[in-house]
Amino acid sequence: MAASTFALIHGAGDVGWSWHLVADVLRERGHHVLTGASSAEPWPLEEQPRIPTRVLVCTDDRFFPVEFLRRVTRERLGLEAEEIPGCHCVALSHPRELAGALTAPARTMRATSMHAHSDLRRPPTEAHTNSERPCCREDPPQ
């Protein structure tokens, strides 16, 4: 497999350090890795970049349930999420498995621009209240 460049972006409230184990594995396999960008900042571009994009969701994530992430991925990116085993902190708990999933052939991938998704920059609507978000329930999903 030819060397690829991976831009690993952490979630809000986290730091680029959370990717260090995965970055090490990817570099061992000959890839280039960029970390440190923040997803907490507003999306600065008018459209998604024209690069291959895929979404991996973890089946054991109790903070963001799989069904919620599948729906958000379809609605905001127009992609179908791929499931991998792991929890919310998969980059720290299963770095080799995550690196393997990142380098494996994608089942679905989009390489085109996504003009329709400027809603990523829009503030939440009334339909996005905490009571309706599966990740914000008092009891984690079973």
Image (cartoon, rainbow, N blue to C red):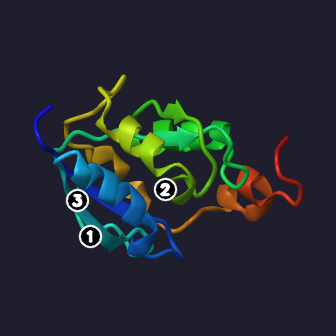
Quadrant of the frame with the C terminus: top right
The percent coordinates of residue 102 (x first, y second) are 35, 40
Q: Which mark is residue 91?
A: 2
Instruction: Report x, y in % for residue 8.
Output: 33, 59
Q: Position of residue 116 (x, y in %)?
A: 33, 45
Q: Nearer the viewer, residue 109 or 94?
A: 94
- Dot 2: what SS? helix
Above or below, 71 relative to 36: above
**Amino acid bearing label 3:** Val
Mark 3 → mark 2, Cα distance in angstroms = 14 Å
Q: Amino acid at mark 2?
A: Ala
The structure residue drawn at horizontal position 64% and vertical position 39%, both measured from the top left corner, is 66
Place of residue 128 in the rendered image (x, y in percent of width and height, measured from the top left): 66, 58
Q: Which badge, 3 or 1, is on the more N-terminal residue?
A: 3
The kind of residue on which mark 1 rests is Pro
* Residue at mark 1 to residue at mark 2: CA–CA distance: 25 Å
Q: Which residue is mark 3?
A: 33
Q: Is residue 48 visible?
A: no
* Label 3, residues with CA under 10 Å away: few <14, some 14-19, many ≥20: some
For mark 1, give the secondary structure: loop
Residue at point 53%, 35% (across, down): 84
Looking at the image, can residue 79 be seen? yes
The answer to whether the residue labelled 3 contacts the one labelled 1, judged by CB atoms less than 8 Å apart, is no
Location of residue 79 by image quarter: top left
Residue farthest toward the top in the current orientation of the protein: 107
Q: Residue furthest front?
A: 28
Q: Which residue is mark 1?
A: 44
CB-based contact (under 8 Å), mark 1 and mark 2: no
Residue at (18, 44) in percent of width and height: 51
Q: Quadrant of residue 24?
A: bottom left
Q: In screen coordinates, is 62 left or right of 5?
A: right
74 relative position to 60: left or right: left
